[in-house]
Image: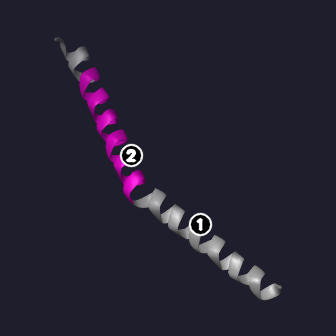
Amino acid sequence: MDLAQFSGFLIFLSIFTMGFWLMIFLLTFIVPYWLIGNIKEIIKYRKEAKKAK
């Protein structure tokens, strides 16, 4: 394995690792935060709709 192949392999590994940790971050923090906020907003609008009736 020469230097060009080795540097390409390191670049691939670094991009793959960054993508892996970004996916873990998204699945454990961002998506649940988004879902919980969305559910709270739906509940709030339903309560407001009941009060309006």
Q: Which residue is mark 2?
A: 23
Mark 2: secondary structure: helix
- Left/right placement of residue 31 relative to residue 4 reads right
Please, is residue 31 above or below residue 6 in the view? below
In front: 28, or 44? 44
Question: Residue 39: x, y in percent?
Answer: 58, 68
Horizontal relation, residue 26 to residue 11: left or right: right
Give residue 38's mark. Answer: 1
Q: Secondary structure at mark 1?
A: helix
Kindly identify the residue that appears in the image at 63 percent across and 75 percent down: 43
Give the CA separation, mark 2 to mark 1: 21 Å
User: Counting other residues with Cα less than 10 Å from the Cα at mark 2, is it few (<14), some (14-19), or many (20 or more)?
Assistant: few
Q: Main secondary structure of the magenta part?
A: helix
Q: Residue furthest left?
A: 1
Type of the residue with mark 2: Met
Q: Residue 26: where, in percent of width, then height?
A: 42, 52
In the image, residue 34 sits, relative to residue 23, either above or below, namely below
Residue drawn 77% across and 80% down?
49
Rendered residue at 69%/82% (across/down) = 47
Question: Any magenta on residue 7?
Answer: no
Residue farthest toward the right in the current orientation of the protein: 53
Residue 38 shown left or right of residue 6 in the figure: right
Q: Which residues are magenta?
A: 8-28
